[in-house]
Image (tube, grey):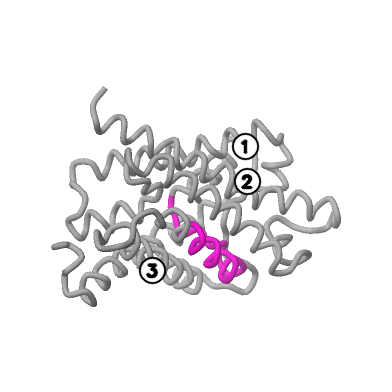
Amino acid sequence: MSDLAKRCIAELAGTTLLVYFGAGAAAITLMMARGTDTGTPFNIGIGALGGLGDWFAIGMAFAIVIAAVIYSMGRVSGAHVNPAVTIALWATKRFPAGDTGAYIIAQLIGGALGSLLFAASAGMDAVTIGGLGATTPFPGIGYSQAILAEAIGTFVLMMVIMGIAVDRRAPPGFAGLVIGLTVGGVITTTGNIAGASLNTARTFGPYLIDSLLGGPDLWVYFPIYIIGPIIGAVVAAFFYDYITGGEAKAA
């Protein structure tokens, strides 16, 4: 098996775990909300009944699984588990163009597999009530607002990745913890705007499996989770290089 194949398998596995546990936590939150209030429509239950505590719990689920993936698979593939991160590293010439497409395909497959496994584990309520944790803009949030929120959230995430994982001058051993907690914090603060996906693969998986299993059809929102995260990650990578004077590349 080639080195690229092994790295892609690691990306697939890491994204599978990310979606199963992270998006799964969002689905469970909705299922619990529906159990309390049978009139709660899809996606509005997060935050509506549990307040910010809902988003903190979901954010911590993401934080823990991201840290686990980085510490267990980071040495194999870099643990991008996010097309926006891969594209940003490619754009700043830190990742080979020939591997970029393979990584993104692996991440998208992993996202779909994570949602499929969660549906198999939790049953059809996870699809019909929880929407498999799919991200959508919340009531009153416009398309452009959602893109902006996703771009800002991913900008913060990518800046942290650049500083703690990409820059060779960063202290070793902290990447998983810091990156995971950053995602958790962004989700807690911005989740009730557009769901705080920050990751095209994280949204793709629930959308695809929802469509296949009779859940909500949300594809009209998918461009939000392509455009926002990619813009945010690419701008952050170039901005980091600018403020460090390119020293991160030379280190």
Q: Which residue is found at the position 29% from the left and 69% from the top?
A: 235
Of callouts 3 and 1, which one flags the residue occurring earlier in the amino acid sequence? 1
Residue 226: quarter of image? bottom left
**Secondary structure found at label 2:** helix
Closer to us: 174 or 74: 174
Q: Are marks 1 and 2 in contact (CB under 8 Å)?
A: yes
| Magenta highlight on residue 195 | yes
Q: Amino acid at mark 1?
A: Phe
Going by the picture, which residue comes out furthest to the top?
1
| CA distance for labels 3 and 1 | 29 Å
User: Start and end of the magenta stretch?
Assistant: 180-200
Residue 40: quarter of image? bottom right
| CA distance for labels 3 and 2 | 24 Å
- Quadrant of the frame with the C terminus: bottom left
Q: Which residue is mark 1?
A: 118
Q: Which residue is found at the position 44% from the left and 55% from the top?
A: 199
Q: In the rendered view, tell whether residue 3 sits above or below residue 244.
A: above
